[in-house]
Amino acid sequence: MATKTEEPQPTILIVGAELGGVMLGVLLEKANIPYTILERSTTVKPPGSAMSIGGTLFLLFDQLQILDEFVTVVKHSTQSTIENESGETLLTTDYTPLRELTGYKGYIPARPRLYELLLKQIPAHKIHFGKRILTIIKNKDDDNVHIQTADGTKYQGDILVGADGAYSAIRQRLYERLRAQSILSKSDEEDMPFSCTCLVGQTNELDPKQFQHLNNTENAFITTLGTDKPYSCALFSTFDKRVYFMVIHHLDRTMSRAVQELRFRSSEKSEWGPYAAQTMCDETRDFPISIGTGKMTLGNLYDRIPKELISKVMLEEKVFTTWHSGRTHATKFILLEDKAL
């Protein structure tokens, strides 16, 4: 009687070590599937803001056996509010029914704390920083994908995952191959439009006596809508007595990264560098917020933020149609959207 032979596990190469890439690594580690994570930066800059997480991820965290540790570094939140500049509440959302529906409470984790927790699950020898991808070759002889980085190191695997952001180098290489075969959709070749830019950051540890919202055990998430101005902001208070924020500039027309870079190509003052972040801080310093004693503005937060922990980013709005290439597990290219987490 013939015995069934098991196929060997595919080796996964993950390019990009932010939240999406690291989360995939944690899943593969748990499933005992071989993988390597390659990150271009020498270190990953802590993502600037916070996020709201509910039962959809908690079941996964429970299965990964990290839920107990996760709840020790996050703040429980039962509601969120939207208010105007005068501090008047426009809308309150109650999240308490979610526990009955999902079995889990809602929490506000700082993205850096969530990232640190996930990174701890990855063995150090499986993640490599300072690895800029130079070449990607699909070898017909061994049916593998071969990668060479700028430092001369070579890697090979069966599946290549691009988890390197919206402007993914892996996406560009994949689309080049599909374009050469005339099978890339027209929509995938179009620029990624955006109608908002966003300032994200995190304060140092604050005094709860001065910033009383830190003591609020129910509402950790406040959104303030600007009056007759193109700005709004979202503030998240976290368990470690910090405030994480997103200040959104609602543009009067849709833009693209290509258009913005063309405008600033001849200038050292890049639209996305430190100068741009500081400029947006200056433009929004007087935006009122209601999280502390007396009259407070965003400037009260900006003055308590290390400059390296504040960034200006685009909020692109596009749904790609092509996310993978390859009919079998061998030499499959897969794209992973970081915002999925």
Image: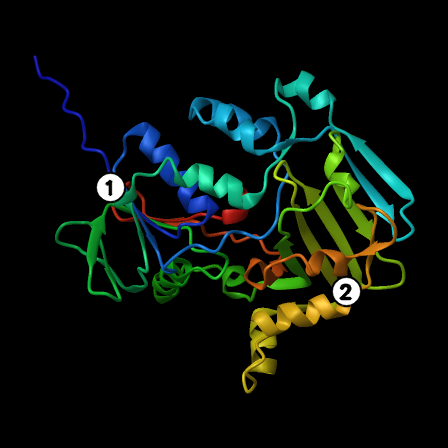
Please give left or right for residue 191 compared with residue 180 in the image. right
* Residue found at the far left of this picture: 1
Distance CA(mark 1)–CA(mark 2): 48 Å
Please give left or right for residue 287 compared with residue 247 in the image. right
* Residue found at the far top of this picture: 1
Q: How is the image coloured?
A: rainbow
Q: Is residue 226 above or below residue 253?
A: above
Crowding around mark 1 (Cα neighbors within 10 Å: few <14, some 14 to 19, many 20+) is some
Task: Kindly identify the residue that appears in the image at 62 percent across and 44 percent down.
Answer: 50
Q: Amino acid at mark 2?
A: Thr
Of residue 325 and residue 169, the one placed in the foreground of this image is 169
Crowding around mark 2 (Cα neighbors within 10 Å: few <14, some 14 to 19, many 20+) is some
List the residue tagged with mark 2: 284
Is residue 218 at all visible to an observer of this figure? yes
Q: Is residue 160 above or below residue 134?
A: above
List the residue tagged with mark 1: 11
Of residue 128 and residue 16, the one placed in the foreground of this image is 128
Question: Dot 2 lies on which element?
Answer: helix
Question: Residue 216: image x %, image y %?
Answer: 76, 33
Check residue 185 in the rendering and tell me which mark sits there, or answer none: none
**Residue 274: quarter of image:** bottom right
Is residue 12 at all visible to an observer of this figure? no
Task: Kindly identify the residue that appears in the image at 92 percent across and 44 percent down.
Answer: 88
Question: Dot 1 lies on which element?
Answer: loop
Task: Kindly identify the residue that appears in the image at 25 percent across and 44 percent down.
Answer: 125
Of residue 258 and residue 199, the one placed in the foreground of this image is 199
Q: Amino acid at mark 1?
A: Thr
